[in-house]
Image (cartoon, grey):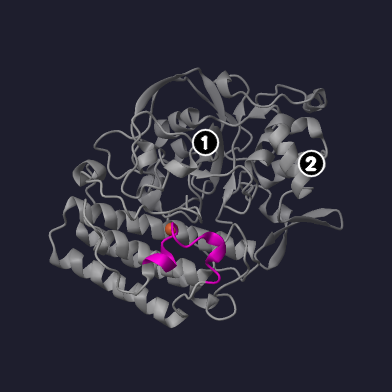
């Protein structure tokens, strides 16, 4: 997750143990080089056409001016990979005043449109010069733990901004810049309406020591005990969400808890953000095109926030899964380290994947973002700590998330009102981990009838799913 207000502690003089931070990661210099180049290539792909009319864009709380954001990517890479000195003053930047311009701790979000930013070509030159020097360091120096850690951090940071450029283009109604997933996500034969039963028991929540690069908020693993639970094999689809909307979901106050109701009233939301009804049929805005919802009926619904997900659950007499449940389910299928499934692994695991398909959308969980026991902030101190307590954990990863970042344990986090990000949700049957049981629906939800644990979510998705 990237927050526009995230910041860096320029005065941090703590000394870090980079072997510990790297946590046994074995990514070699050649791979780091390839990832650095790949991340930059995608940044360019997503932003090249923004030069000129769109390089600043509208002043909104949920977006950054691209001219600033692109300079910030270069600054971040330079600060950590080239300038940072463990426990000592950082080296000076390549560009005068770079910290004031591009460190998000110093450059307040609202002010970014007014700063004397590098012009587009100079900004691109700054990006090039930094990347060139980082690649040179990788070639010239032995790959020590510090350089490896910060190269990974830089790659993942740029990947996250890439995802943000993607959804920002949707937010602002710019032309689509097709983001192809870098892994196979076609999952024919999965019944979206079906639950899978998990026996519960003891589950390790959090990063294992020696398991490779993890973010500070994943440290460290602890055992939690879960009751048996049932989890939908797939996220809620457009068709399923449309049934909720058509059943008056946005008019029935009893389906919304107090914060959700307050959000709905404040925004006057009558349905999902990008939906409209034309001649009695739902349409969904995809960048600059309005598409029939029916064309994507079986795909996971995107661009709904946590409040909307909770209201749907109340209507469907379901609940959101906890982080622990989500983790246990995913790790039982994928293992705990990565899901970067190449075609061979995907084919080998195809049947198991049908038990829990993920990786197409970020999935809201029931849990607020909180530190695990043993948390201590990493060098990028503001990656996690400022957001504990008022953000919600999302799991999974979306079609635009690079596979190198996907792990069942990876914790994304957004505030519950965000519906501009690539997020949807899956549901769990009531019961199971009752500590996070869903909202009480009003009695009118009984109209759904049947065995609420499974029958409420009708519809199937027999066809393959492709990237939205
Ligand atoms: Fe950033």
Q: Which residues are magenta?
A: 99-114
Residue beneath the point at 52% across and 36% down? 389
Total tally of numbered discs in the picture = 2
Measure how far apart labels 2 and 1 are at the Cα level: 27 Å
What residue would you read off at disc 1? 389
Q: Quadrant of ligand 1?
A: bottom left
Determine whether the residue tagged by mark 2 lies in a helix, strand or loop: loop
What residue would you read off at disc 2? 250
**In-image side of 386 versus 248 (left or right):** left
Which residue reaches farthest right? 279
Quarter of the figure with the C terminus: bottom right
> Is residue 16 in sight in this rendering?
yes
Q: Is residue 259 magenta?
A: no
Instruction: Indicate the quadrant where residue 439 lies.
Output: top right
Residue 338 x/y as whole percent = 36, 43
262 or 54, nearer to the observer: 262
Please name which of the two marks, 2 or 1, marks the residue nearer to the observer: 1
Residue 54 x/y as whole percent = 58, 75
Determine whether the residue tagged by mark 1 lies in a helix, strand or loop: loop
């Amino acid at each position: 997750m990237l927050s526009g207000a995230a910041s860096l502690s320029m005065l941090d003089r703590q000394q870090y143990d980079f072997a510990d931070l790297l946590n046994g990661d074995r990514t070699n210099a050649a791979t780091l080089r390839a990832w650095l180049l790949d991340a930059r290539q995608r940044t360019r792909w997503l932003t090249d056409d923004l030069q000129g009319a769109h390089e600043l864009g509208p002043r909104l709380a949920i977006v950054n001016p691209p001219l600033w954001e692109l300079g910030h990517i270069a600054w971040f890479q330079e600060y950590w990979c080239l300038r940072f000195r463990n426990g000592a003053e950082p080296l000076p930047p390549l560009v005068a005043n770079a910290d004031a311009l591009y460190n998000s701790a110093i450059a307040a979000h609202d002010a970014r449109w007014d700063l004397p930013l590098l012009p587009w070509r100079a900004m691109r030159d700054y990006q090039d010069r930094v990347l060139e020097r980082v690649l040179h360091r990788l070639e010239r120096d032995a790959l020590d733990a510090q350089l490896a850690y910060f190269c990974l951090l830089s790659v993942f940071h740029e990947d996250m901004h890439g995802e943000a450029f993607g959804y920002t283009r949707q937010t602002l109604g710019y032309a689509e810049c097709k983001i192809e997933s870098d892994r196979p996500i076609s999952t024919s034969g999965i019944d979206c309406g079906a639950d899978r039963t998990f026996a519960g028991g003891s589950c390790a929540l959090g990063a294992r020591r020696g398991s490779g690069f993890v973010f500070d908020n994943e440290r460290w693993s602890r055992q939690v005990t879960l009751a048996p639970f049932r989890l939908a094999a797939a996220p809620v689809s457009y068709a399923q969400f449309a049934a909720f909307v058509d059943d008056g979901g946005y008019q029935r106050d009893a389906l919304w808890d107090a914060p959700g109701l307050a959000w709905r009233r404040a925004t006057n939301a009558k349905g999902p953000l990008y939906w409209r009804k034309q001649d009695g049929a739902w349409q969904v805005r995809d960048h600059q095109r309005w598409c029939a919802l029916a064309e994507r009926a079986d795909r996971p619904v995107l661009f709904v926030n946590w409040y909307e997900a909770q209201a749907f659950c109340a209507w469907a007499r379901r609940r959101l899964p906890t982080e622990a449940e989500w983790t246990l389910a995913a790790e039982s299928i994928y293992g705990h380290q990565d899901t970067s499934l190449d075609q061979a692994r995907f084919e080998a695991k195809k049947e198991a994947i049908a038990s829990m398909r993920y990786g197409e959308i970020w999935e809201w969980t029931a849990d607020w973002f909180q530190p695990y026991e043993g948390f201590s902030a990493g060098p990028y101190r503001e990656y996690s700590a400022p957001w504990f307590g008022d953000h919600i954990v999302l799991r999974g990863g979306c079609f635009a998330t690079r596979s190198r970042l996907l792990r069942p344990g990876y914790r994304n986090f957004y505030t519950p009102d965000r519906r501009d990000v690539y997020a949807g949700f899956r549901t769990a049957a009531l019961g199971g981990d009752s500590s996070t049981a869903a909202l009480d629906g009003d009695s009118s939800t009984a109209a759904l009838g049947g065995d609420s644990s499974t029958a409420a979510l009708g519809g199937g998705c027999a066809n393959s799913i492709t990237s939205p």
